[in-house]
Image (spheres, grey):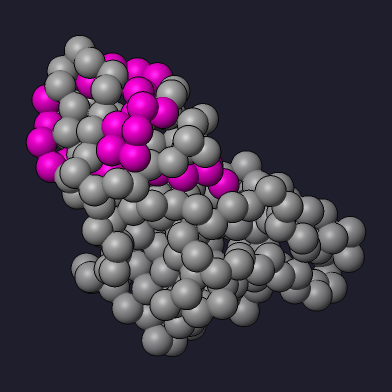
Amino acid sequence: ASLHGYVADCVANDESTVNDDGNITASDATLTVTNSVFVAGDVGKSIVVHGAGAAGALLRTTIASYNSATSVELTATASTTVVNAEIRWGTDNTAFLQAAIDAAKTIVDDQGPTRIVAQAVSIPPGLGLIMGEVILYRGVTLRGTGSSTTGLVHGGGSQACIQCDTGVTNNNNIRISDLAIYGAGSTTTYGFAAHYCIKGCGASNLNIYNCNDNLFLDRSYTFDIENVVSDSAIRHGLN
């Protein structure tokens, strides 16, 4: 299925690119940084400022206006003053990626319940921001160009970056491969959650970092794992 509208323009803190010099004062909307990283085209993009929300939570908002390469105005004001905070911003690709997966699901569903020819959604190189939660369905493969070249950066919000459909108990023939997932700490509940994966499912050439649970296998009794790198233990829920 074709991936339309997706833009890999996220600027974030990942394994190679660190942007952790965001400064904002409580009750103010002006965000400043030391390095010249902002451009006029950033206006309207989603942005996450770590620790600047209520009680030190994430501040998830958008860029309202451009002041300079080191300063922008945010749509929402900060609740907490932060200095040298981690920030990540870019085009929110949640809807674009979900639309491509939904289109692939439609093709799979049209084949009927007994014949499944898997459909693939390919993500281009670069870092893409995901502010919401992406649902992966049976018969759909999600793949990048490589774990060192394609990355999804999650915006937190107490939700998963990617998870299988929780509305069914036979998520067969689901695969995810050749990409990296960068969470926003504990507010990314799962990097990837495999729910009810019974056969033909797996993850390969996948790097997952900084999520509450990086890879969570929920009642997935047959799930192939090959060359998966995680900075925390893989958790298996048998409930």
> How far from the left and from the top, in percent, is residue 214?
32, 62
Residue at point 56% right, 45% down? Answer: 94
Q: Is residue 31 above or below residue 137?
A: above
> How far from the left and from the top, in percent, is residue 163?
50, 55
Residue 78 covered by magenta stretch = yes
Residue 188 covered by magenta stretch = no
Does 192 sit left or right of 121 as displayed?
left
Q: Quadrant of the C terminus?
A: bottom left
Question: Could one spot residue 217 in this view of the protein?
Answer: no
- Work out whether residue 61 or residue 175 is closer to the camera in this orientation and state it: 61
Q: Quadrant of residue 122?
A: bottom right
Residue at point 49% right, 70% down? Answer: 150
- Work out whether residue 10 or residue 226 is closer to the camera in this orientation and state it: 10
Q: Is residue 202 above or below residue 110?
A: below
Q: Quadrant of residue 66?
A: top left
Residue at point 27% right, 68% down? Answer: 15
> How far from the left and from the top, in percent, is residue 33?
22, 40
- Work out whether residue 58 or residue 63 is closer to the camera in this orientation and state it: 63
Does 188 sit left or right of 44 as displayed?
left
Q: For the magenta stretch, what is the residue range?
A: 66-93
